[in-house]
Amino acid sequence: MMQKLTNNILTRSTDKNILIDYFFKKNNQPKPLVVFCHGYKGFKDWGAWNLVAEAFAEAGFFFVKFNFSHNGGTMEQPIDFPDLEAFGENNYTKELNDLQYVLDDVTKADFEFSSEIDSHAISLIGHSRGGGIVTIKASEATNISKVISWAGVSDYASRFPQGEALEAWKNSGEYHVINGRTKQEMPHYYQFFEDFQENSNRLNIERATKKIQIPHLIIHGTTDAAVSVEEAKNLHTWNPKSELYLIENGNHVFGAHHPWKKTELPNDLAEVVQTTIEFIKA
Protein backbone atom coordinates (compact mmCIF):
# COMPACT_ATOMS: atom_id res chain seq x y z
CA MET A 1 0.00 0.00 0.00
CA MET A 2 1.56 3.27 -1.15
CA GLN A 3 1.88 5.83 1.62
CA LYS A 4 2.04 9.51 0.66
CA LEU A 5 2.48 11.40 3.89
CA THR A 6 2.87 15.04 2.98
CA ASN A 7 3.45 18.30 4.86
CA ASN A 8 4.74 16.75 8.07
CA ILE A 9 6.36 19.34 10.33
CA LEU A 10 9.81 18.80 11.78
CA THR A 11 9.80 21.04 14.83
CA ARG A 12 13.11 22.60 15.81
CA SER A 13 13.72 24.52 19.02
CA THR A 14 16.34 26.97 17.73
CA ASP A 15 15.76 27.00 13.95
CA LYS A 16 12.83 27.40 11.61
CA ASN A 17 10.71 24.27 11.21
CA ILE A 18 11.00 22.05 8.15
CA LEU A 19 8.09 20.75 6.08
CA ILE A 20 8.71 17.21 4.84
CA ASP A 21 7.06 14.45 2.76
CA TYR A 22 7.46 10.65 2.97
CA PHE A 23 6.55 8.36 0.06
CA PHE A 24 6.89 4.58 0.51
CA LYS A 25 5.14 1.22 0.27
CA LYS A 26 4.32 0.16 3.81
CA ASN A 27 5.34 -3.45 4.48
CA ASN A 28 7.61 -3.32 7.56
CA GLN A 29 10.58 -4.18 5.33
CA PRO A 30 13.63 -1.89 5.48
CA LYS A 31 13.98 0.03 2.23
CA PRO A 32 16.87 2.09 0.84
CA LEU A 33 16.41 5.74 1.80
CA VAL A 34 16.44 8.46 -0.87
CA VAL A 35 16.47 12.11 0.22
CA PHE A 36 15.77 14.77 -2.41
CA CYS A 37 16.86 18.42 -2.20
CA HIS A 38 15.20 21.07 -4.35
CA GLY A 39 17.06 23.96 -5.95
CA TYR A 40 17.10 27.77 -6.00
CA LYS A 41 13.62 29.31 -5.99
CA GLY A 42 12.39 25.74 -5.64
CA PHE A 43 10.11 23.81 -3.31
CA LYS A 44 9.23 20.19 -2.67
CA ASP A 45 5.87 20.39 -4.48
CA TRP A 46 7.20 22.08 -7.61
CA GLY A 47 6.15 20.69 -10.97
CA ALA A 48 6.37 16.92 -11.20
CA TRP A 49 8.31 16.26 -7.98
CA ASN A 50 5.35 14.37 -6.50
CA LEU A 51 5.30 12.01 -9.49
CA VAL A 52 9.05 11.56 -9.03
CA ALA A 53 8.44 10.64 -5.39
CA GLU A 54 5.78 8.10 -6.39
CA ALA A 55 8.09 6.51 -8.96
CA PHE A 56 10.82 5.98 -6.37
CA ALA A 57 8.35 4.57 -3.85
CA GLU A 58 6.96 2.18 -6.48
CA ALA A 59 10.52 1.05 -7.17
CA GLY A 60 10.95 0.04 -3.53
CA PHE A 61 12.54 3.09 -1.92
CA PHE A 62 11.63 5.21 1.09
CA PHE A 63 11.60 8.61 -0.61
CA VAL A 64 11.88 11.87 1.34
CA LYS A 65 11.56 15.40 0.01
CA PHE A 66 11.37 18.59 2.00
CA ASN A 67 11.37 22.37 1.84
CA PHE A 68 14.55 24.01 3.01
CA SER A 69 13.63 25.98 6.11
CA HIS A 70 14.35 29.36 4.48
CA ASN A 71 13.15 28.62 0.94
CA GLY A 72 10.37 31.20 1.25
CA GLY A 73 7.50 28.83 1.93
CA THR A 74 5.63 28.47 5.21
CA MET A 75 4.07 25.59 7.12
CA GLU A 76 0.62 26.81 6.05
CA GLN A 77 1.57 27.68 2.46
CA PRO A 78 4.33 25.34 1.27
CA ILE A 79 3.97 26.24 -2.41
CA ASP A 80 5.61 29.39 -3.79
CA PHE A 81 7.09 32.14 -1.61
CA PRO A 82 4.80 33.83 0.93
CA ASP A 83 7.75 34.42 3.32
CA LEU A 84 10.23 36.56 1.41
CA GLU A 85 11.93 37.61 4.63
CA ALA A 86 12.97 34.00 5.24
CA PHE A 87 14.07 33.70 1.61
CA GLY A 88 16.35 36.69 2.10
CA GLU A 89 17.85 35.13 5.22
CA ASN A 90 18.69 31.86 3.50
CA ASN A 91 22.25 30.71 2.86
CA TYR A 92 24.14 27.55 1.93
CA THR A 93 25.13 26.72 5.50
CA LYS A 94 21.49 26.77 6.57
CA GLU A 95 20.61 24.39 3.73
CA LEU A 96 23.40 21.99 4.75
CA ASN A 97 22.15 22.16 8.35
CA ASP A 98 18.58 21.49 7.19
CA LEU A 99 19.68 18.44 5.23
CA GLN A 100 21.63 17.11 8.21
CA TYR A 101 18.61 17.61 10.46
CA VAL A 102 16.40 15.68 8.02
CA LEU A 103 18.94 12.85 7.80
CA ASP A 104 19.25 12.66 11.58
CA ASP A 105 15.49 12.67 12.03
CA VAL A 106 14.56 9.94 9.56
CA THR A 107 17.38 7.62 10.68
CA LYS A 108 16.86 7.90 14.45
CA ALA A 109 15.80 4.74 16.26
CA ASP A 110 12.43 6.12 17.34
CA PHE A 111 11.44 7.56 13.95
CA GLU A 112 7.80 6.65 13.31
CA PHE A 113 8.66 4.59 10.22
CA SER A 114 12.07 3.27 11.28
CA SER A 115 11.02 -0.30 10.39
CA GLU A 116 10.58 0.85 6.77
CA ILE A 117 14.07 2.34 6.39
CA ASP A 118 17.47 0.78 5.83
CA SER A 119 19.66 3.48 7.36
CA HIS A 120 22.76 1.79 5.92
CA ALA A 121 21.58 2.53 2.36
CA ILE A 122 21.16 6.30 2.02
CA SER A 123 21.24 8.11 -1.32
CA LEU A 124 21.07 11.88 -1.80
CA ILE A 125 19.61 13.54 -4.90
CA GLY A 126 19.94 17.27 -5.47
CA HIS A 127 18.49 19.36 -8.29
CA SER A 128 20.31 22.49 -9.51
CA ARG A 129 21.63 24.39 -6.48
CA GLY A 130 20.60 21.35 -4.41
CA GLY A 131 23.10 19.33 -6.43
CA GLY A 132 25.87 21.34 -4.81
CA ILE A 133 24.35 20.85 -1.36
CA VAL A 134 24.21 17.05 -1.67
CA THR A 135 27.71 16.92 -3.14
CA ILE A 136 29.13 18.82 -0.17
CA LYS A 137 27.14 16.70 2.29
CA ALA A 138 28.28 13.48 0.62
CA SER A 139 31.90 14.62 0.92
CA GLU A 140 31.48 15.19 4.67
CA ALA A 141 29.13 12.51 5.95
CA THR A 142 30.16 8.91 6.56
CA ASN A 143 26.67 7.39 6.29
CA ILE A 144 25.85 8.32 2.68
CA SER A 145 25.97 5.43 0.18
CA LYS A 146 25.41 7.20 -3.14
CA VAL A 147 25.03 10.77 -4.39
CA ILE A 148 23.21 11.99 -7.50
CA SER A 149 23.26 15.44 -9.09
CA TRP A 150 20.38 16.45 -11.39
CA ALA A 151 21.24 19.56 -13.43
CA GLY A 152 23.55 20.41 -10.55
CA VAL A 153 25.85 23.40 -10.19
CA SER A 154 29.62 22.99 -9.98
CA ASP A 155 30.35 26.31 -8.31
CA TYR A 156 28.70 28.79 -5.96
CA ALA A 157 31.24 31.65 -5.92
CA SER A 158 30.67 32.75 -9.53
CA ARG A 159 26.94 33.11 -8.94
CA PHE A 160 27.33 36.07 -6.59
CA PRO A 161 27.37 39.66 -7.86
CA GLN A 162 30.85 40.90 -8.73
CA GLY A 163 32.66 44.25 -8.59
CA GLU A 164 30.43 47.31 -8.31
CA ALA A 165 27.30 45.18 -7.99
CA LEU A 166 28.81 43.39 -5.00
CA GLU A 167 29.81 46.72 -3.44
CA ALA A 168 26.29 48.07 -3.95
CA TRP A 169 24.89 44.94 -2.29
CA LYS A 170 27.20 45.41 0.69
CA ASN A 171 26.20 49.06 1.06
CA SER A 172 22.44 48.54 0.76
CA GLY A 173 22.34 45.20 2.57
CA GLU A 174 20.13 43.53 -0.01
CA TYR A 175 19.57 42.94 -3.69
CA HIS A 176 16.52 41.56 -5.45
CA VAL A 177 15.87 39.04 -8.20
CA ILE A 178 12.60 38.84 -10.10
CA ASN A 179 10.81 35.52 -10.08
CA GLY A 180 9.72 35.14 -13.69
CA ARG A 181 6.73 32.98 -12.80
CA THR A 182 5.33 34.68 -9.68
CA LYS A 183 6.67 38.18 -10.58
CA GLN A 184 7.82 38.64 -6.97
CA GLU A 185 10.90 40.70 -6.14
CA MET A 186 12.84 38.17 -4.07
CA PRO A 187 15.45 39.60 -1.68
CA HIS A 188 18.94 38.36 -0.94
CA TYR A 189 20.39 39.89 2.21
CA TYR A 190 24.13 40.48 2.38
CA GLN A 191 24.49 37.80 5.07
CA PHE A 192 24.20 35.30 2.19
CA PHE A 193 27.56 36.44 0.81
CA GLU A 194 29.12 36.86 4.26
CA ASP A 195 28.22 33.28 5.16
CA PHE A 196 29.74 32.08 1.89
CA GLN A 197 32.96 33.96 2.57
CA GLU A 198 33.21 32.62 6.12
CA ASN A 199 32.67 29.06 4.88
CA SER A 200 34.22 29.29 1.42
CA ASN A 201 36.38 26.19 1.83
CA ARG A 202 33.48 24.02 2.95
CA LEU A 203 31.25 25.45 0.21
CA ASN A 204 33.76 24.78 -2.57
CA ILE A 205 32.02 22.19 -4.74
CA GLU A 206 35.21 21.31 -6.62
CA ARG A 207 36.96 20.46 -3.35
CA ALA A 208 33.95 18.42 -2.21
CA THR A 209 33.68 16.54 -5.52
CA LYS A 210 37.34 15.54 -5.42
CA LYS A 211 36.79 14.09 -1.92
CA ILE A 212 33.84 11.85 -2.84
CA GLN A 213 34.63 8.16 -2.46
CA ILE A 214 31.12 6.75 -2.97
CA PRO A 215 29.24 6.07 -6.25
CA HIS A 216 28.43 9.42 -7.84
CA LEU A 217 25.98 9.99 -10.72
CA ILE A 218 25.79 13.28 -12.64
CA ILE A 219 22.77 13.80 -14.92
CA HIS A 220 22.42 16.92 -17.05
CA GLY A 221 20.50 18.12 -20.07
CA THR A 222 22.65 19.17 -23.01
CA THR A 223 20.55 22.30 -23.66
CA ASP A 224 20.19 23.42 -20.03
CA ALA A 225 19.97 27.23 -20.19
CA ALA A 226 20.08 27.77 -16.42
CA VAL A 227 23.11 25.60 -15.54
CA SER A 228 25.42 24.83 -18.43
CA VAL A 229 26.18 21.21 -19.24
CA GLU A 230 29.83 22.26 -18.91
CA GLU A 231 29.27 22.31 -15.15
CA ALA A 232 28.35 18.61 -15.26
CA LYS A 233 31.51 17.95 -17.25
CA ASN A 234 33.51 19.85 -14.60
CA LEU A 235 32.08 17.64 -11.86
CA HIS A 236 32.92 14.52 -13.85
CA THR A 237 36.48 15.75 -14.43
CA TRP A 238 36.96 16.40 -10.72
CA ASN A 239 35.67 12.93 -9.85
CA PRO A 240 36.71 10.62 -12.72
CA LYS A 241 35.06 7.69 -10.93
CA SER A 242 31.67 9.39 -11.29
CA GLU A 243 29.16 8.49 -13.98
CA LEU A 244 28.11 11.25 -16.38
CA TYR A 245 24.73 10.76 -18.07
CA LEU A 246 23.61 13.41 -20.55
CA ILE A 247 20.00 13.92 -21.63
CA GLU A 248 20.19 14.93 -25.28
CA ASN A 249 18.37 18.26 -25.77
CA GLY A 250 17.24 18.12 -22.16
CA ASN A 251 16.50 21.40 -20.36
CA HIS A 252 17.10 22.43 -16.76
CA VAL A 253 13.95 20.76 -15.42
CA PHE A 254 13.96 17.81 -17.84
CA GLY A 255 10.75 18.79 -19.58
CA ALA A 256 8.67 19.57 -16.48
CA HIS A 257 7.13 22.90 -15.47
CA HIS A 258 4.97 24.28 -12.69
CA PRO A 259 2.21 23.47 -12.24
CA TRP A 260 2.41 19.94 -13.72
CA LYS A 261 -1.12 18.61 -14.21
CA LYS A 262 -0.40 15.47 -16.19
CA THR A 263 -0.42 12.07 -14.49
CA GLU A 264 2.81 10.94 -16.13
CA LEU A 265 6.34 12.29 -16.04
CA PRO A 266 7.71 14.12 -19.08
CA ASN A 267 9.92 11.81 -21.13
CA ASP A 268 13.23 13.38 -20.12
CA LEU A 269 12.41 13.38 -16.41
CA ALA A 270 11.18 9.78 -16.66
CA GLU A 271 14.57 8.88 -18.15
CA VAL A 272 16.33 10.73 -15.33
CA VAL A 273 14.29 8.88 -12.71
CA GLN A 274 14.78 5.46 -14.30
CA THR A 275 18.53 6.03 -14.74
CA THR A 276 18.80 7.11 -11.10
CA ILE A 277 16.81 4.12 -9.82
CA GLU A 278 19.03 1.71 -11.75
CA PHE A 279 22.15 3.49 -10.45
CA ILE A 280 21.02 3.25 -6.81
CA LYS A 281 19.98 -0.40 -7.17
CA ALA A 282 23.22 -1.43 -8.88
Image: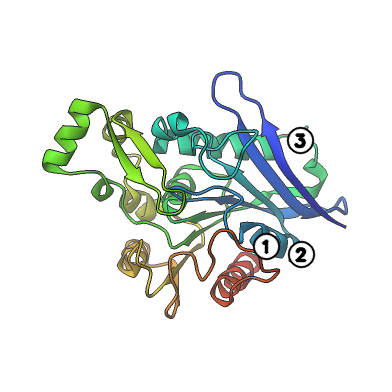
| Residue 51, label in figure | 1
Q: Residue 261: horizontal and vertical position, in percent?
A: 65, 64
The part of the image, by quadrant, that contains residue 152 is bottom left
* In this picture, residue 254 sits left or right of residue 109: left
In three-dimensional space, the C-alpha distance between marks 2 and 3, rounded to whole angstroms, equals 22 Å
Residue shown at the point (72%, 58%) measured from the top left:
61
Q: Which residue is mark 3?
A: 111
- Which circle's residue, 1 or 3, is located before the other in the chain? 1
Instruction: Evaluate if marks 1 and 3 touch, with contact meaning CB atoms under 8 Å apart.
Output: no
Farthest-out residue, bottom = 248
Farthest-out residue, front = 183
- Which circle's residue, 2 or 3, is located before the other in the chain? 2
Q: Is residue 221 above or below residue 144?
A: below
Q: Secondary structure at mark 1?
A: helix
Quarter of the image where the C terminus is located: bottom right
| Residue 58, label in figure | 2
* Residue mark closest to the camera, 1 vs 3: 1
| Residue 154, label in figure | none
In three-dimensional space, the C-alpha distance between marks 1 and 3, rounded to whole angstroms, equals 25 Å
Q: Please state which amino acid type lies under the numbered disc 2.
A: Glu
Q: Please state which amino acid type lies under the numbered disc 3.
A: Phe
